[in-house]
Image (cartoon, rainbow, N blue to C red):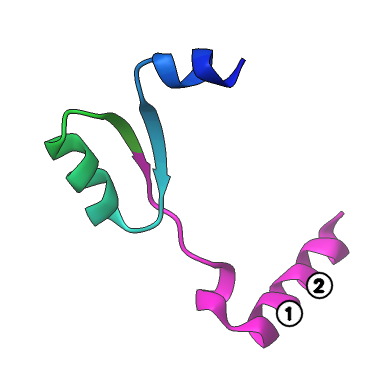
Amino acid sequence: MISDLFARELRVINCGLESFAEELEQLGVSVIHVEWSPPAGGDPRKAALLAALEDEDG
């Protein structure tokens, strides 16, 4: 049940802004931070070009 889920210790995987992970750590939450950013810096045209390159390798 959902109540069982909320009765457990909170453990978080944080992707993106490290400050979110830092805030949770300060609150005593178990957190793992994953450094992530959108492919090609979020530029859709560049991301499409990278995706096309990946398809050619496969």
SS label for mark 2: helix
**Amino acid, disc 2:** Ala
Classify residue 1 by image quadrant. Answer: top right
**Amino acid, disc 1:** Leu
Classify residue 57 by image quadrant. Answer: bottom right
Judging depth in this view, the residue of 38 and 17 nearest the camera is: 17
Q: Where is residue 47 in the image (x, y as percent from the top left)?
A: 67, 76
- What's the magenta region? 33-58
Image disc number at residue 52: 2
In the picture as drawn, the residue positioned furthest to the bottom comes out as 45
Residue drawn at x 35%, y 17% as measured from the top left: 9
Is disc 1 in contact with disc 2, using a CB cutoff of under 8 Å?
Answer: yes
Residue behind mark 1: 49
Q: Marks 1 and 2, how far apart in space?
A: 5 Å
Image disc number at residue 28: none
**In the image, residue 19 above or below residue 44:** above
Dominant secondary structure (helix, strand or loop) of the stretch shown in magenta? helix
In the image: residue 6, left or right of residue 47:
left
Q: Quadrant of the C terminus?
A: bottom right
Residue drawn at x 34%, y 34% as measured from the top left: 32
In the image: residue 53, left or right of residue 12:
right
Residue 36 highlighted magenta (yes or no): yes
Q: Position of residue 8 (x, y in %)?
A: 40, 14
Residue drawn at x 33%, y 58% as measured from the top left: 17
Judging depth in this view, the residue of 11 and 34 nearest the camera is: 11
Q: Where is residue 55 in the image (x, y as percent from the top left)?
A: 85, 63
Q: How crowded is mark 1: few (under 14 residues within 10 Å), some or many (20 or more)?
A: few
Q: Where is residue 16 in the image (x, y as percent from the top left)?
A: 40, 56
